[in-house]
């Protein structure tokens, strides 16, 4: 997808940037008071310096010419070095990267040091197991936030995110979620067509997320001597449920979010699911395939299938069946509707990743907070609910998922401590908690 943004949004943003900052200051909108300098700069902090975090930092700086990246945090210094080097190679924003060595924080507490460094906006992009913790701290610190998906890896984390979203609203903070398809003009326009009746009453939704493994687990023999359990698991975070939530929650959650969107963000009644692992892996405890069937109160069924196995058919698509037609996204370059109404999307594409940050910074400059926090939590819970059903082999209701007491995040997490790997779930044996 092209890395460009709609010219109208960019023009509106630039026009508002100079005047609105002063207005926001007068309104007492948080985050701008400390940023009133001769350049009207906004200080940006980055928590989690991997590929997605680095990309988000780039998009943030592209969104606002007067924003500066001033603090970064990660558990690995090489990640920080690589991220800053990459950002420094992007000519348009290289001059906005102003991270002194003193503001490069390493360790499990790096997130708090970033928040305490005088920033105005924070990008939260560590492994998902940390998202709820870092989001709560960012809201408490009064920062505007971009938080990557998923919101959390367990129900206690979801409940924390819901509370953080409410607190952010009470503080007039902007909180933009990394569910990027919500900022994709093709999908926005297509869903408007469907929700306005283009396919008639929606009967079912089928979503696929078939890909290769994102980051396969390396052999135990490659583990550096003296590396702690915590460091090893975070370095290979995609293979541990407490860190990634499993593939359904970390990757296919994008499809869950589209299902939730089509259902007007109303929760399903229940779901059943299958899943497992067919390709052996040394270490780690995630599955390599899932299929979840959600039942909604109006009788609509939504099915989400995902697989991460090498050498298989790959597809990321959405099939919406209505009483008067069908809608398909992902099987062709643009979405289409066929049936009583025939329609093909014909707009001008823009970059959904960039749009997220354009919207965030525009909201800050204009003093009109955007808060995606609730749907960040509920779309993530939709995926967690499916994982729970697959892991246990049971039907799981929305209330059971939301109120689950299963806490995956380790208590008293220590960098040098022992951290045993929980056994892989076994349907029919693993219990709902």
Image (cartoon, rainbow, N blue to C red):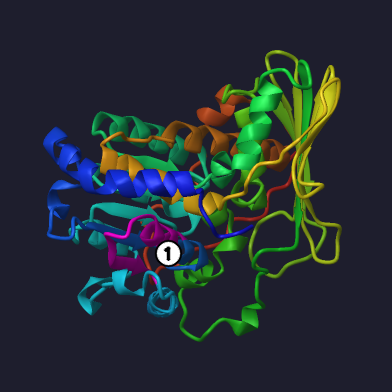
- Secondary structure, mark 1, is helix
Is 223 situated above or below 64?
Answer: below
Q: Specify the quadrant that holds the C terminus.
A: top right
Question: In percent of the image, x 13 and y 52: which residue is there?
Answer: 34
Residue at image mark 1: 58
Q: Is residue 33 visible?
A: yes
Determine which quarter of the picture holds residue 363.
Answer: top left
Question: In percent of the image, x 30 and y 31: which residue is there?
Answer: 169
Determine which quarter of the picture holds residue 12.
Answer: top left
Q: x, y percentage for residue 207?
A: 75, 39
Q: Is residue 388 visible?
A: no
Task: Give the number of callouts.
Answer: 1
Task: Choose between 242 and 149: the one closer to the eye.
Answer: 149
Task: Choose between 222 and 141: the one closer to the eye.
Answer: 141
Is 31 situated above or below 96?
Answer: above
Q: x, y percentage for residue 373?
A: 42, 36
Q: Specify the quadrant that holds the N terminus.
A: bottom right
Magenta span includes 60:
yes
Q: x, y percentage for residue 158?
A: 46, 37
Is 199 situated above or below 183?
Answer: above
Question: In percent of the image, x 18 and y 60: which residue is there?
Answer: 39
Q: Is residue 351 left or right of residue 174?
A: right
Label 1 Cα neighbours within 10 Å, binned few <14 / some 14-19 / many ≥20: many
Task: Choose between 421 and 380: the one closer to the eye.
Answer: 380
Q: Residue furthest bottom?
A: 225
Q: Which span of residues is magenta-colored?
A: 56-75
Q: x, y percentage for residue 318?
A: 76, 39
Is 253 situated above or below 99?
Answer: above
Question: In percent of the image, x 37 and y 35: which residue is there?
Answer: 370
Q: Is residue 10 left or right of residue 335?
A: left
């Amino acid at each position: 997808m092209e890395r460009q943004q709609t010219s109208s949004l960019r023009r509106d943003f630039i026009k508002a940037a100079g005047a609105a900052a002063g207005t926001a200051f007068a309104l007492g909108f948080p985050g701008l008071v400390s940023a009133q300098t001769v350049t009207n700069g906004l200080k940006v902090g980055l928590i989690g310096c991997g590929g997605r975090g680095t990309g988000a930092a780039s998009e943030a700086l592209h969104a606002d010419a007067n924003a500066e990246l001033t603090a970064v945090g990660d558990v690995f210094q090489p990640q920080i070095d690589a991220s800053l080097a990459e950002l420094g190679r992007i000519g348009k924003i290289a001059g906005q990267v102003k991270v002194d060595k003193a503001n490069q924080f390493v360790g499990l507490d790096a997130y708090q040091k970033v928040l305490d460094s005088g920033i105005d906006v924070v990008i939260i992009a560590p492994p998902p197991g940390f998202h709820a913790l870092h989001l709560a701290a960012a809201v408490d610190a009064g920062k505007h936030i971009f938080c990557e998906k998923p919101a959390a890896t367990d129900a206690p984390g979801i409940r924390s995110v819901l509370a953080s979203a409410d607190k952010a609203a009470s503080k007039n903070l902007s909180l933009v979620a990394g569910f990027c398809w919500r900022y994709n003009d093709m999908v926005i326009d297509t869903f408007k067509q469907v929700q306005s009746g283009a396919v008639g009453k929606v009967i079912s939704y089928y979503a696929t997320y078939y890909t290769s493994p994102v980051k396969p687990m390396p052999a135990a023999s490659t583990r550096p001597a003296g590396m702690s359990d915590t460091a090893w698991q975070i370095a290979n975070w995609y293979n541990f449920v407490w860190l990634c939530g499993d593939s359904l929650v970390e990757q296919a959650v994008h499809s869950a979010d589209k299902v939730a969107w089509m259902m007007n963000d109303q929760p399903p009644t229940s779901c059943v699911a299958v899943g497992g692992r067919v390709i052996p892996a040394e270490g780690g405890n995630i599955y390599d395939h899932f299929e979840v069937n959600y039942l909604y109160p109006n009788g609509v069924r939504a099915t989400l299938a995902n697989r991460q196995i090498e050498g298989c058919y790959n597809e990321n698509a959405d099939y919406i069946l209505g009483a008067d037609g069908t809608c398909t996204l992902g099987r062709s370059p643009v979405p289409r509707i066929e049936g009583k109404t025939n329609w093909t999307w014909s707009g001008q594409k823009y970059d959904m990743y960039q749009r997220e940050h354009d919207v965030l910074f525009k909201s800050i400059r204009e003093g009109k907070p955007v808060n995606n926090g609730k749907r960040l939590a509920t779309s993530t819970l939709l995926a967690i609910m499916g994982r729970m059903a697959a892991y246990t082999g049971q039907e799981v209701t929305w209330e059971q998922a939301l109120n689950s007491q299963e806490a995956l995040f380790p208590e008293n997490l220590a960098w040098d401590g022992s951290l045993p790997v929980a056994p892989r779930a076994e349907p029919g044996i693993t219990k709902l908690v």
